[in-house]
Image: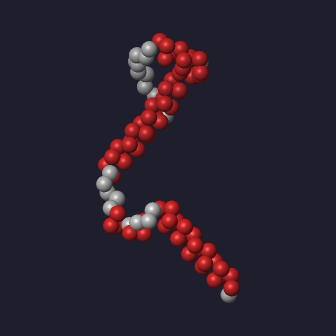
Amino acid sequence: MHTKRTHVILPEALVAQIDKLVGKRGRSRFLAGVAEREIARLRQLRALERAAGSWKDASHPELREGAAEWIETLRAEDEKRSRDLAKR
C-alpha cells in the first residue's frame, strides 16, 4: 500500500489518549483504521439515504403482516415440505 505523509492538527488531549492506547508508533495505523471505518460508515449512510423510499409496500404484499409473520410462514412451509419428503 502506498502511503502519503500529511499534516493533521489534533487536540493535545486527543493525541495523548491515542498514544496511551496504541503508543506513538501506532498512531498513524490507528488513525488510518478509524478513517477507513468512518468512510465506510458514511458511504453506507449515503447509500441508505439514496435508497430511501425505494421500498414500496405494494411490491411486497407478503410482508403486510410484518416480516416476523412472513418468516414464520416460510419456516412452517419448509417444515411441511421436509415432513412430506420424509414420508416418501
Looking at the picture, does residue 36 appear above or below residue 58?
A: above
Extreme residue in the bottom direction:
88
Residue nearest the observer in this picture, 55 or 44 = 55
Is the image coloured rainbow, by chain, by secondary structure, or in one colour?
secondary structure
Can residue 2 be seen? Answer: no
Q: How many numbered marks, from 0 up?
A: 0
Residue 10 shown left or right of residue 88 in the figure: left
Res. 22 image quadrant:
top right
Extreme residue in the top direction:
12
Q: Residue at x 32, y 51 (%)?
A: 52
Q: Residue at x 49, y 34 (%)?
A: 1
Looking at the picture, does residue 43 appear above or below residue 68?
A: above
Residue 82 shown left or right of residue 52 in the figure: right
Res. 81 image quadrant:
bottom right
Residue nearest the observer in this picture, 72 or 55 = 72
**What x and y, as percent, mark residue 31?**
49, 26
Can residue 4 be seen? Answer: yes
**What x and y, as percent, mark residue 33?**
50, 31
**What x and y, as percent, mark residue 82?**
64, 77
Task: Pick the quarter of the image with the C terminus.
Answer: bottom right
Extreme residue in the right direction:
87
Extreme residue in the front direction:
65
Q: Residue at x 47, y 62 (%)?
A: 67
**What x and y, as percent, mark residue 69?**
50, 65
Residue nearest the observer in this picture, 3 or 80 = 80
